[in-house]
Image: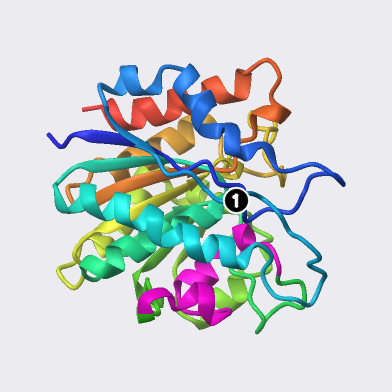
Amino acid sequence: MRNIVVIDAPSNLGLRPPAPGTVPGCYKLAGAMREQGIVRRLGAFEGGVVVPPRYDRGDWKEGDGVFNAAAIAAYTPKLADRIEHHVRAGDFPLVLGGDCSIQLGASLALRRIGRYGIAAIDGSADFRHTGNSDAVGAAGGEELAIATGRGQRDLSDIEGLRPYVRDEDVRLFGIRDYDEDREELARLKIPTVSVGEFREWGGADLAGAVLKTLETPVTDGFWVHLDADVLDPEVMPAVDAPDAGGLLPDELEALLGVLVRSERCVGLNLTIYDPDLDPDGTAGALLADIVVAALTQD
């Protein structure tokens, strides 16, 4: 049994401000999960905190590329160092974000080690890049594109390791049936499983079938990226983009459990839940319960 090591990555650098003069509250995710007893309940070890730079978009304006890019480019290798250390030691890192740009830390860490895939459980593809949008700016909606080598080089080619993840090693679960990126992803032969398909084909069986394609010897393993907005806003309203038509808690728990219990899964990160949008902590408690159940079921 591998040791679960909890690492805090409280970065909000990849999201737009929710209102003028404010910053995204997802940097409080790690603290909220700890308040739910996630370390104790998992019997996990402490991996410490990787402190992010200050959120400051300065005089950034639309058309200037990714905001906070220099800060994200500086933070990503620091987070990668911590994750790489634990993966090489045979531990299972559980990285508590943060926005989705923290996935770049995991992807860079694994690229240093070998060839790894990624199973992204996300309500959207986060595949925005200059080739398909004029609205590039928030890395939290672009991290999968960046990780696969698209986007500005100071983020997509850190340490000259572009791409961190190959297109053929990506699997996407839980995007909405109407996601506009699905056509491009299909052309690139990046497999996606929408919420409707998940239900039509049978969640656990489908997850198991896709898992087999991630466990092939061509890769050294895979990482799981979990964005809380994959859940339906009826149960998870505390996210920056609460789009209708998401997974229900039991569906996510089953999917996540199949993936993280694979011997080839080397770690998991959790993103986007915003405690500022969850004053009574109900959504946070649900998210913690799902993660704990997925990691502890036999």
Residue 202 against residue 33 in the figure, above or below = below
Query: Is residue 55 among what the camera can see?
Result: yes
Which residue corresponds to the image point at 79% horizontal and 44% vertical from the top-left? 18
Q: Which residues are magenta?
A: 137-159
Residue 176 against residue 42 in the figure, above or below = below
Point out residue 92 in the picture as x, y percentages from the top left corner: 24, 42
From the image, which quarter does the N terminus lie in?
top left
Q: Does residue 274 appear to the left or right of 50 in the view shown?
A: right
Which residue corresponds to the image point at 33% horizontal and 18% vertical from the top-left? 41
Q: Residues within 10 Å of mark 1 (few under 14, many from 20)?
A: many
- Find disc 1 in the rendering and name its residue: 123
Front one among 55 and 104: 55
Secondary structure mostly seen in magenta is: helix
Point out residue 110 in the picture as x, y percentages from the top left corner: 28, 63
Which residue corresponds to the image point at 48% horizontal and 57% vertical from the top-left? 75
Residue 293 against residue 209 in the figure, above or below = above
Q: To which quarter of the image does residue 125 belong? A: bottom right
Specify whether residue 29 is painted magenta. no
Determine the secondary structure under disc 1. Answer: loop
